[in-house]
Image (spheres, rainbow, N blue to C red):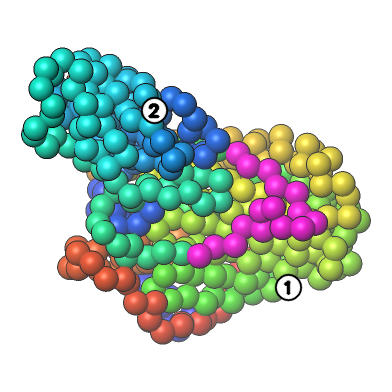
Amino acid sequence: MDAEELEEGTESAGGSARAPRIFRAFYPVLASEALGAKPRPVRLWGRDYVLFRDAEGRACALRDVCPHRNVPLSLGRCVEGRLECAYHGWQFDGDGRCVRIPALVHPLRKNFSADAFSTRERHGLVWLRPSGETELVDPDVRSWSGESGYTTVVREVRARGSLHAVAENALDVPHTSVLHRGLFRTGERHAITGHVTRDNHSIEIEYRGEPAPKGLAAWLLALRGGDGAVEHFDRFFLPGIVQVEYRLGSATHFVITGFLSPVDDEDTKLFAIASFRTPLPGALLGRLLLPLALRVFAQDARILAAQSRVLREQGGERFVSSEVDVMGPAIARLLRGASKAESVRASGTLEKGALRRGTFELLA
Ligand code: FES
Ligand SMILES: [Fe+2]
């Protein structure tokens, strides 16, 4: 990193009580398989939506408010691909149009509509765009899920923390040997180099010089695949995707992709997809690693909740960052840049901009 960027890296990550929100982008809100015959309420950026499947099986999203008497539509039921309100039975199609009012004698003459939102299904998840006709950013992320030779485990977890705090935590190397002492990394530290590549959409840090991992989880991973060389990448993509990738020798490849879903400013869901290829039977490794991963996450969630409490009490972030706190400030910069671009343009996309590179050293 050059001097200017290091300087930038020491500012407060958020700078205000509310972390930047980006609305013109898709966020995952529910596992696809959880959306069946019943409507499902979901919450994103503090607003309530109802999901249901139309007659073609398409996932549809409406604001979770009936335009008639403002009862939550999610209390209703699905009738032949339409969502029926639980109060007076008005029925809405996937575009939010009211197509039936059961008490009407004459055919429906007025247009009554519930607000409808764009959805899509990717990575086994239903995604919702809270605003706009187009996406400001549209990341194309490979999760290795379902690829030949890979085992995939999917889990949904939730933490009391902002999207920024959860993203930083997921990609923050310096905390791992302290907060997860013994589980993930050992106390013994080695100097490693972080190579940073970033543009206006994403940031990637490649760590070089990392010894073969120790600690219980790492031992399981490296059990038979490790021949010394470790490749480790941490990535963040706007608006809220985190990814940790490890290759140990030629045989072991492990990728966790976390799709963040901001329920509100301090409550974030994470849809985690772990894909791995190892010399051990994948299903066995999955069963061994899952409880460890959940323990690691529980430790993170406890810290994030405590941090949130402080941020709420003091009215926002007052962070200081050292030279090794690269990821958190970089994510904050990306979020602020995107939020600014969104506030000045109602359509169009955020330019990726020039690639910027830098390096830093840390003891990990
Ligand atoms: S409140 Fe929904 S139909 Fe009356
Ligand atoms: Fe952690």
Under mark 2, the amino acid is: Glu
Q: How many other residues sit within 10 Å of disc 1, few (<14), some (14-19) or many (≥20)? A: some
Q: How many other residues sit within 10 Å of disc 2, few (<14), some (14-19) or many (≥20)? A: few
Provide the residue designation for mark 1: 209
* Picture layout, residue 101 above or below residue 164: above
Count numbered badges in the picture: 2
Residue 312 appearing in the image: no
Residue 150 among magenta residues: yes
Residue 330 among magenta residues: no
Provide the residue designation for mark 2: 80
Under mark 1, the amino acid is: Gly
In the foreground, 259 or 38: 38
For the point 26% across and 52% down, which residue is it?
Answer: 131
> CB of mark 2 within 8 Å of CB of mark 1?
no
Please state the horizontal and vertical placement of residue 56, each as a whole percent of the image.
Answer: 44, 40
Q: Nearer the viewer, mark 2 or mark 1?
A: 2
The residue lying furthest to the right in this view is 224
Relative side of 215 to 329, left or right: right
Please state the horizontal and vertical placement of residue 101, each as a whole percent of the image.
Answer: 18, 22
Relative side of 62 to 227, left or right: left
Please state the horizontal and vertical placement of residue 357, each as a whole percent of the image.
Answer: 50, 82
Q: CA distance from mark 2 to mark 1?
A: 59 Å
Residue 109, which numbered label?
none
Question: Bounds of the magenta span?
Answer: 140-155
Relative side of 229 to 122, left or right: right
Please tell me which of labels 2 and 1 falls first in the chain: 2
For the point 81% across and 52% down, which residue is it?
Answer: 221
Dot 1 falls on a residue whose secondary structure is loop
Please state the horizontal and vertical placement of residue 307, each as a whole percent of the image.
Answer: 42, 41
In the foreground, 347 or 298: 347
- Residue 112's quadrant in the figure? top left
